[in-house]
Amino acid sequence: MASRDVVTYETPLTKLIRVLSVVFLALYLVWTLLPFFIMFISSFKDLLAAFKLPAVGDWSDIGVFFDFTPTLKHYRSLFEDNAFGTYTMNSLIAAGGSAVISVIFGSLAAYSLSRVNFRGKSDLFFWIISTRMAPVVAVMVPLYSIFRSLDLVGTLPGLILAYTTFNLPFAIWILKGFFDNVPYAIEEAQMVDGATRFQAFRSILPLVAPGIGAFIVLCILFAWNDFLFAAIIGSGGAKTLPVATRELVQPQNIQWGAIMAAGVITTLPMMALGLVIRKYLVTGLTMGAVKE
Amino acid sequence: MFHKPKNALYKTVSRRRFLELGGYGAAALGVGSLAVGMNSTIMATRVQAASSEDAKWKQFAGSKLTFLSENTPPSFAIRDNIKAFYDLTGIEVEVLTDDLPVVQQKVGIDVRAGKADYVLNYVQDKPIGSPFADFYADMTPMFGDETLPQDPEGYGDGSWVENFLNACGRFYSAEKVIALPYDAAIPVTFYRQDLFEKHTKEFEAEYGRRLEFTPDTTWKHVLEIATFFKKLKEGGADVPYGYAQHQGSFAWTTQLDIQRLMFSHGRWTDFNVDDKLGSKTPGKTNWGDEQSIFMLEQFKALADVSHPDNLANGTLELNTVYQSGNIAMQVQYHEFAASVEDEKTSRAAGGKTAYAYCPKGEASWIKNGGEAVNGTNCGIGGIGINKNASEQLQRAAYLFAIWSTSKQLQFDVLKGLGGTPTRKSVLEMPEVVEAKKRPSKMPNALTFDVAYGIGIQDPNFVLGPKIPEANEYHSLVASETQRMLTGEMSPAETAESLKSQIDELNGA
Amino acid sequence: MTDLTEKSPALQDVAAKLFRARSHSIEVEARPRTEVLEKPLTFNPPAPKRYYFYLMAPAIAVLAFISLYPFFWLIFLSLQDVDIGGGEWVGFDNYIRLFSDSRFINGWTLLLKYSVICLTLQLSIGVLLAVVVNNSRYERFLVTALLMPMMMAPAVAGLLWLFLYNGTFGWYHWLMQSVGILDSASILARADTALLAVIIVDVWQWTPLITLIALAGLKRVPRDQLEANMVDGASPMRNFFSITLPNLYPVLLIAVLLRFMDNFRFIDSLLVLTGGGPGSATKILPVYLFEVAFKFFKLGRGAAIALTLLLVTIILGKILVRVFENPKAGRS
């Protein structure tokens, strides 16, 4: 809030700026939220109702957007005719599984990296983080072949492992920042009291727990929203929500109503999670470089 | 400098061997171990030729097969009815469906790696058959095998709709059959009869003939019809555009669109090879000759008067444009009739749409002295057996292949979800004949007279180009002609660019 | 990420006691991370390194398996002509041929063009938005609203925008036509507008990230400097350019690098929206690579392309890590 109360007097210029910024904000909000609104409303529309559009330039007819009888049939068909229940489970298991694995392995590694120094540490660290930055398509080619030879393609464990390729480096990188913030002296004090090294490690876990919790959620978010890995590694056997949604683009008929409904189902839980971890989001999305 | 010595040691490390090495590497890393394929062991003993039919069907009971297919109605229908096959054979079949590009990827990786995760594959003729033909088992030895059950109608060319077996079953060799026709997509002209009738007076005044679509309607006429509708529309009349084509991101359908126009005029083809069998060494391409440049000019002219969304439209999107009443005519695959005739989703339903052959070549547009034909191509999806699978599994898969292409099943699929039969006998069934007339219980059947008529017969039918590089070829044709349509290149430049890139692709 | 000791009073107590004994003050911990990074190790003989390596081992093994091993495989692959029916060693042929492959060069040009336009738009809109939001009473609500697009799966976002852009029934298509910025063709149907269409989606989805980052940066702009300047009679506008913006540079640089790399990494929405078309108007390099590897099955050529992409990413990553470690480095 640093800059807000600095301005104490009002000139015509600042007034103008204020008005402009309100307009800008309003426009931006509409621009950001309108697609969601259209998606949400369209998910309750029949196909023919969704085709209704005013004539070009006819602003008075804009009301046809609301001219429809709401139907839940798209949602029903997703779960009844299509197996969206299963796909939701797949998404949950794959995203949750990789998040848990990443955080367990990641916190062990991050803790160690935070506590020990050795030659080549920064190289190791760079390698870890570059794994996370590699273009997905580039790693897909060899990864697919390797996973195939291990019969991991089209299975949930395979998908979990695939998501670990980006979640684990992410977890190590972020969690190291957390452990760096915990003074070594705390463990030391524990060990002086007779705790083993591992018990000492465990004793500081509660201190980083809120952070870890938030980053499990972030890992879930990344995995849940993935498309390429799920499409190729997940194949038919471990179909997740984004892939299933994409598949609604059928050869005979693009089922827009169902796609919009699936979009709502895929997006809503992540929005809720996003709100829960709002505080950590910037840190997470910038890989710890920027803190709020 | 980087040339390899002729007998260098590393040359002997084949890709397959390398995959194995990779597997050992993985094991050495301590994470997981090299697992064997997922194919289950088959306990059955070989049945005798004299065994009962039932024993022949049941001999592979307990085995498990995976069938990777495109997400087409027959595949959905078969997946829903898979229990019938299990009851018949005791073989468990998992049917996986995906978009064609995804199927291509997965099949490609599977067969190329020497694996058989998908014992049964959807062999879509050019996109999958052409590049991977060598990885499918030749079915001919199994056709006459008396220890296997056989379809009473057999598998000869005569059992299938004309040319279908050629399209998806034979690649580079007349002796082998690698797939049986499973479903079909034949382009036919969908047009709005109601609109044609309504505006025929105005059209007649300008062009001196009726606004109608006959087997003799040429591409030049299509151009005129599209121009006519566009002019009406721009004059403020409440009419749709006249025509639109598939120019969207799915390269193959884009190539098919151009091919029909090119072939109609003097039976022009890309390469001088046997059109039915194709060739692994197609040699120099014909792109760049006078005929091809002239045709591209016409193609551009047609696009200029068509619906402006051409470049964003694949098959589905184009059909949506038609369904929503925004074009009066489209050359579309006949499987789309079901959705066009559905009153709930289409404004072109209820007898408004009529079906006709693909447009004919315009004599005055032919520069190479050939004949004018109703150029028609196809996408015939076959069902093929992965050669990497064990012999027993291949034989088990054969049962599924003949079951899924049998007359009764094709009829059931047609009745249920709107299939596209490939067996001639299905077309002759009384119920199907009945359905060719409105009101139809099987809307796809409304197209059958034209879809399975002269279009797919010689000399109108073009099957190729069957070349190993088919997919990159499709992609090149699509992207270069798209650039032409956006005005980036002239038709002559496009033909030249295609020529050099395709020749480089084929090493010619 | 707030300092952890800040949150638990009990912990603060313990820590304070411990630190007093060592004449460290708790304030040290409240400073930015870099300054305490290496310190704790020097207090006491650390546990044997071996112990820590054991703890690290599982993660390293998993990473080695899913990143290092594929990486070497990629290199090996790129030196072969992996064509139908097995591979053949061709040395650097795949690389040499890339230079004459117009689609490869076009892919890079487009990727850069795409990234630069995306980033320019995102930066200018994002920073402006951050300043406005920072001065707003409704900051909390606004930030919440801004988060939304980022939570959506890019593939789903692609589908949603495909729906909005549709030339037959898309509302945004209608909107753009109605305000007169688009003629009858859909925005995706023309080579000159298709790239813009995918850029718009990226801007819609990721401008908020820049805003949030800039917002975090704005909170750290030293208030006393601003006030001092103000007393000297500087206008708010000048203040913004002479103090606020320079203070934002380090975080913005990080934002730019991250977004740049993400443009290399993710092609989900682009694949759904245009698949690279029309023509090759949106065939940025990763899309071309996807085609070569998974459509044409030229795994050798694909691997070579992938490595060029990786190389650039690694360079960008190096820069990013340097900025991480020393935020000031980015300022010059």
Image (spheres, rainbow, N blue to C red):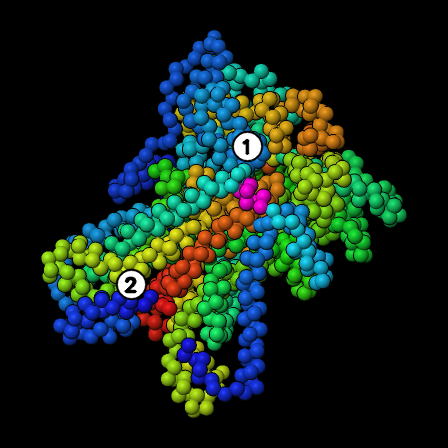
Disc 1 is placed on an element classified as: helix
Q: Is residue A43 above or below residue B88?
A: below
Residue shown at 42%/20% (left/top)? B61
**Relative image position of residue B486 (x, y in whole percent):** 65, 55
**Relative image position of residue B186 (x, y in whole percent):** 65, 34
Check the image and name the residue furthest to the bottom.
C232
Q: Residues within 10 Å of mark 1 (few under 14, many from 20)?
A: many
Chain letter for mark 2, please.
Answer: A
Labels 2 and 1 within one chain: no
Amino acid identity at mark 1? Ser
- The answer to whether residue A186 is left or right of residue C161 is left
Residue shown at 69%/33% (left/top)? B443
**Residue that carries the numbered disc 1 in the rendered image:** B75
**Residue that carries the numbered disc 2 in the rendered image:** A177
- The answer to whether residue B387 is left or right of residue B230 is left
Chain letter for mark 1, please.
Answer: B
Q: Quadrant of the N terminus of chain C?
A: bottom left
Is residue C75 visible in this depiction of the protein? no
